[in-house]
Image (tube, helix red, strand yellow):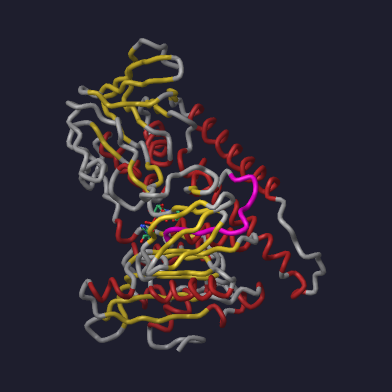
Amino acid sequence: MVPTGETAAFDVVVVGGGPGGYATALYGASAGLSVAVVEKEKVGGTCLHRGCIPAKEFLETAAVFRTVADAKEFGVQAEQPTVDFAVSQARKQKVVEQLYRGLAGLMKGRGITTVPGTGSLLAGHRVKVTGPDGERELSGRHVVLAAGSVPRTIPGFDVDGTVVMTSDEVLDLERLPASVAVIGGGAIGCEFASMLADLGSQVTVLEALDTLLPGCDEDVVGVVSRAFRKRGITVHTGVAVHDHQPTGSGTVVSFGDGQHVTADAVVVSVGRRPATDGLVADGAGVEIDGRGYVVVDPFQRTTAEGVWAVGDVVPTAQLAHVGFAEGIVAVKGILGEPAVPVDYTRVPWGIYCQPEVAFAGLTEAAAREAGFDVVVKKDPFGGNSRARIIGETDGLVKVVAERGADGRAGRILGVHMVGPWVTEQLGQGYLAVNWEATVDEVAAFVQPHPTLSESFGETVLALTGRGLHVA
Ligand code: NAI
């Protein structure tokens, strides 16, 4: 630990210990660099403490609930399940704590110095750390900014943690609200809507654009929208949210053309903004753009020599694994090794609502818009034997390929999945897109049967012009 009032020198000082920062630190330490990580809370960041991990843990609680509720269909007699949310909350926290201790131990074991406090970049690769016990200064041959992001809010919806919440507060609830208005139908909005509805809340989603999950393939969105409707989730798309009037026990949210919805709680999930307030002192030479993001080139270099930025502080997809990838690119640059920039058009996406969504590469609409002549095939999970066995047949696999000079489907441009466990099935689709594999190459591989993942192979086989189960 660095004593207060003193300066310590490292090869790399990382500001922020979330996925972008800890990946940079672990990868750098693996390469023999001396690394310090400045963290004002706990290493693990939003993903581990207030985002991906706790949200997916609650979604798993919802999945267990559905399994028990549907047990009778399999001849398994179980009482109608009820949720003791305090137990669910405690289990979630235990999972988070175990992973936190694992990560902290891994970093320590790798020789990384974790410095508690808030870091601010000064000129000359120095980082001022304001900690609970005073100030200290770190200097690095290189500095990596990885301070992450915080939830955005909207005017008129001041977060009070009980009636108006963001993802931060929802994940700490002790009791589930009986009714919820979710503002924003993106990844977070759909995950919370799905989880809360499964556990018994009455959910209304209010989305400004004319579709849920903007940016996802429209066939995928169609499946999610229908599944939400079937489970009693009310979705209003293309509506502006105006304001809300607290009622004492809840609130009335007004939206659209004179419409309103009464709810015990409001979850605001309208995106996240970079946490760059006070991150960089004047004179440090790092450009911040008008929206607050750190400006970087494809190699994660900021406008100041020797200062890099990764994760949610840069204007790229706000995904933990993108932060990991950007951290690796930055460390390779620091080491003077050749690095391949992250190709943001082909990173994997996973959204853990029920049914799950996973994709990599271009949607059909984006491919056409980019000028590709495309060939498309879809394989619904209704025809997949494993999906029938597990009783989850909602969903499909869709593969978008470029039409070759011979008129047949050639290079695979995008793979889009919605349905059971698709976040665990995307791997081969991701590789196909990123390897720029052709339909004929992928179709030559054997898929294990019966599996959910063979639907991808089936869809690609169909794209060759001769399918087995898919025409
Ligand atoms: P988002 O950008 O994915 O979605 C926000 C949604 O809110 C958009 O559909 C937008 O049109 C809508 N919106 C914005 N202002 C609105 C308003 N005033 N009224 C109604 N709707 C409004 O952001 P989200 O869901 O908050 O997630 C934040 C970030 O975290 C995203 O970049 C997301 O990709 C990432 N994330 C990824 C997950 C995953 O991959 N599993 C899970 C959760 C979040």
**Which quadrant of the view contains residue 399?**
bottom left
Say whether residue 55 is magenta.
no
**Quarter of the image with the N terminus in it:** top left
Query: Is 207 located above or below residue 468 in the figure?
Result: above
Residue 281 in the image: state x and y as whole percent: 23, 27
Among the 4 quarters of the image, the one containing residue 411: bottom left
User: Where residue 429 appears, x then y in whole percent?
Assistant: 42, 67
Residue that appears at 35% across and 28% down: 33
Which of the 4 image quarters holds residue 240? bottom left
Q: Is residue 431 above or below residue 147?
A: below
**Vertical arrangement, residue 316 with respect to residue 123, above or below:** below
Q: Is residue 352 above or below residue 390?
A: above
Q: Position of residue 307 (x, y in %)?
A: 24, 32
104 or 292: which is nearer to us? 292
Looking at the image, residue 463 sits to the left or right of residue 286; the answer is right
Is 182 within the magenta? yes
Please give left or right for residue 381 compared with residue 31 in the image: right
Please name the residue shown 51% across and 80% down the image: 380
Q: Is residue 78 left or right of residue 313?
A: right
Q: Which quadrant contains ligand 1?
A: bottom left
* Nearest the eye: 101 or 26: 101
Q: Residue 167: x, y in percent?
A: 49, 48
Residue sitting at x 52%, y 54%: 251
The segment highlighted magenta reads: 173-184
The residue that appears at 62% across and 41% down in the rendered structure is 93
Please give the count of numbered marks on the rendered protein.
0
Locate the C terminus and report the quarter of the image it occupies: bottom left
